[in-house]
Amino acid sequence: MSDELQQQLANSSLYDAESLKAFNQMYTSANNPYAVGGAGVVHGFDKSYYERRARNNKAAQKSREARKKIDAENSHRVNQLEMENNHLKAYIYKLYQENMMMKNQLVQHYPGVVDPAAASMPGF
């Protein structure tokens, strides 16, 4: 593993130096199938382990960013739909009032033909 990659892992916000050292001491080549002895070992792990960790960390960060973007889009859409719903409720109420006004006019011009008490607006 390159020194640059080791430094990135050591400076990562996910792992501080002490935690990484303790983790590496727990998983030496004796109890880690990915760790091998010899020149390729860094802190008890071979290069491929750190490369896989770096790729996984990058993929996890990308996934979190994508999720945040989707959540923001969904939140924006919810706000739009709530506003539209409020406008539609106001429009329905306006139509209801207009309907009641017309029924009252019909009752005045044609008494006994239209029952003004029959009109009700459920949900309001």
Image (cartoon, rainbow, N blue to C red):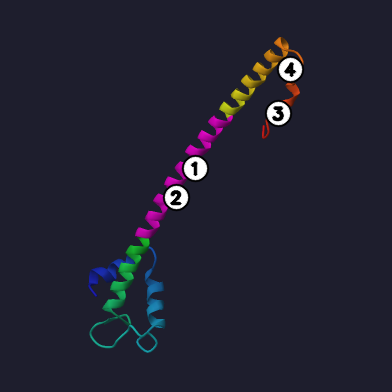
Foreground mark, 1 or 2, reads 1
* Mark 1, secondary structure of its residue: helix
The circle on residue 113 is 4
Q: Amino acid at mark 3?
A: Ser
Main SS of the magenta part reads helix
* Mark 4, secondary structure of its residue: loop
Q: Amino acid at mark 4?
A: Val
Q: Amino acid at mark 1?
A: Val
Spatial separation of the CA atoms under disc 1 and disc 2? 10 Å
Reading the image, the residue beneath label 1 is 78
Identify the residue shown where x is 37% and y is 84%. 32
Whether residue 19 is visible, yes or no, is: yes
Q: Which residues are magenta?
A: 62-89
Reading the image, the residue beneath label 2 is 71
Identify the residue shown where x is 30% and y is 86%. 36
Q: Earlier in the sequence, mark 1 or mark 4?
A: 1
Identify the residue shown where x is 40% and y is 58%. 64
- Indicate whether 121 appears above or below 66: above
